[in-house]
Image: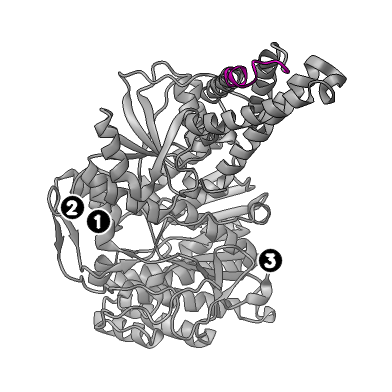
Amino acid sequence: MKFDRAGLAYLHDLLMTGLAFVAAFYLRVGDDLFGFHFEGLLEGLVVVLLTAAITYRLLGLYRGIWRYASAPDLILVTKAATVVSVVSVLLLFLLTRLDTIPRSIPVIQWFVLLFLLGGPRFGYRLFKDRRLALADFSGGEHRVPVLLVGAEDGSDQLIRALSHTPQAAYRVVGVVDDKGGRIGREIRGVPVLGGVDDLPAVVETLHRRGVKPQRLIVTKPEADHDGDLIRRLLDLTEPLGLSLSRLPSLTEFKDALGEGKIELRPIAVEDLLGRPQTVLDRSAIQGLIAGRRVLVTGAGGTIGSELTRQIAALGPAELTMVDAGEFNLYTIDGEIRGRYPGLACHSVIADVRERARVLRLFQDARPDLVFHAAALKHVPLVEANPEEGVLTNAIGTRNVADAARTVGTRAMVLISTDKAINPSSVMGATKRAAESYCQSLDLLPASDGASTRFMTVRFGNVLGSSGSVVPLFQRQLAAGGPLTVTHPEMRRYFMTVREAVELVLQASAYGSAHPQGRGRIFVLDMGEPVKIVDLARNMIRLVGLRPDRDIMIEFTGLRPGEKLFEELLSEGEAPTRTSADGVFQASPRVIDHAVINRLLNELEHAARATDRSRTLATLRTLVPDYRAEDAATEAPRQELGSD
């Protein structure tokens, strides 16, 4: 037996057994223990310890995890104490006729041993979670047999919850340990049958016993989800015919317990990313927003609407939501007013391309902070309509930035994209132009009225955004396929919209507190890029189907303006880590404000005149890295490092 925690538990039990026998003797004979009865003490101690050593191994007493001590463990301890007491007294009778051992010793020993074996276990459990649940786990045969992944708190909570819920739909038949340190042990009487890679053998063993698990449940909290683990589980469960689920969040799980109904959640696309939890400086974010007037452009979009949700929760003095789309603005307006009835919020239909309209809006709202999320982002559509992309993404950003500077806004934050790096599309080039203009304003000396701080936050794709690949795949799945992927080697950076916005706010708070970083761009740590074809295959598995058999995948070829690989940094941008977790700083090439302003004037005139060739030529002058004919086929030269 490995001398690990189980070995320590085994050693503890043997020591407690010896102590129980000595204590029983002393309680019976008192100070006479080391006189007439000393020989019987030594003889009995050897027999009792040998009996216990064999009994505890045979019963598996050391396999229980003290952190999850429960009724099954109490029953096992009682059984072990009984066997040791009965067998040892029988052996001593055969060896010594109990001439030197009082007949009441085994009875006293049984009570003391029960206390010394069970007390530390339940004391440790009480120390850990301040409560003790002694309800026995009862698994009715009518329940769906399930396996759990993770021999930790989540599994203990679910097993305990099921034992308290007679009408529960599931019964746990085993646990799979993703870390491998508790294999062979038990949680509330449920065995830990193996590691993740042992899953096929575990299922086969259960089948031979007549138990056929139908579902695999990941019990780790969402924040601890490992994307690699989820992908491995998907690969393993597909041939075994198991569906994969997870527990809801801890709050939802507790609410479900209160209602007596436990509902599992399907594994979501977000779980496949497996991004580590970012440590947020919530006090700094709160200090940035609380009590201030905040304006969000593109408030009805994916990023803009999440920005308004998180900002509204931070207690701004006033929130102005701006969007050119009536329905999107109506939707987010209703949501914010419903959640925060006491918040002074205003919804304004306005197009950022209209300079005079934007200026009047800012003069009325007088925002302290501006988050500029309004943009045209769909690469092929902007490629087909370059003038519109220029007017919204580049000229619209200039209009918003100039208005913010005119009314003395404290800070403006531009939401940018990884497609602005070495752009091969009009969309990427216009966003890079927007970045450059905000950089130039941020570097203007204070004597020129540049008191406003201009910050840019650059990141990759967000899951589920309008026009992104995930909603497309979901629609194609609902239609029975096929799923269309442009190229088998295409990769993209992904993060959830919630995390993206949290990091935008974190970067904004950091930038506001560190004015010495003017002219730099904040880049979010996006982790590793995801292969789109792998994402498609995993989404098919998530709905219980088999890729290339139940649902086909078709490759359609790169679309105009698309690249195989996106980059977060250009070759000359050396990233530096900031004290804000998940946020880096980069120093892109800076264009003189007068030069970029003149080029943007030319760009606007060409776009409004619908002169496409002059529009694209001016855009190339403004963004020298823009190469419309290049759809990069090589991996990015530089990725965001971890140091």
Question: What residue is drawn where x is 74% and y is 20%?
Answer: 24
Residue at 52% from the left image edge and 74% from the top image edge: 438
Is residue 65 among what the camera can see?
yes
Counting residues from the start of the chain, the first of labels 1 and 3 encountered is: 3
What is the secondary structure assignment of the residue under circle 2? loop
Mark-to-mark CA distance, 2 and 1: 8 Å
Q: Look at mark 3 in the image and give the residue it sits on.
A: 513
Q: Kindly identify which residue carries mark 1.
A: 536
Compare residues 408 and 424 and report the one nearer the observer. Answer: 424
**Alpha-carbon span between mark 1 and mark 3:** 41 Å
Amino acid, disc 3:
Ala
Q: Earlier in the sequence, mark 3 or mark 2?
A: 3
The residue under label 2 is: 547
Q: Are marks 2 and 1 in contact (CB under 8 Å)?
A: yes
Q: Report the magenta residues as a range.
A: 90-100
Describe residue 207's horizontal placement relative to residue 444 as left or right: left
Q: How is the image coloured?
A: one colour
Dividing the picture into quadrants, the one containing residue 68 is top right
Q: In this image, 273 relative to 240: left or right?
A: right
- Residue sticking out furthest to the right: 31
Q: Residues within 10 Å of mark 1 (few under 14, many from 20)?
A: many
Q: Which is nearer the eye, 141 or 45?
A: 45
Task: State yes or no: residue 582 in magenta.
Answer: no
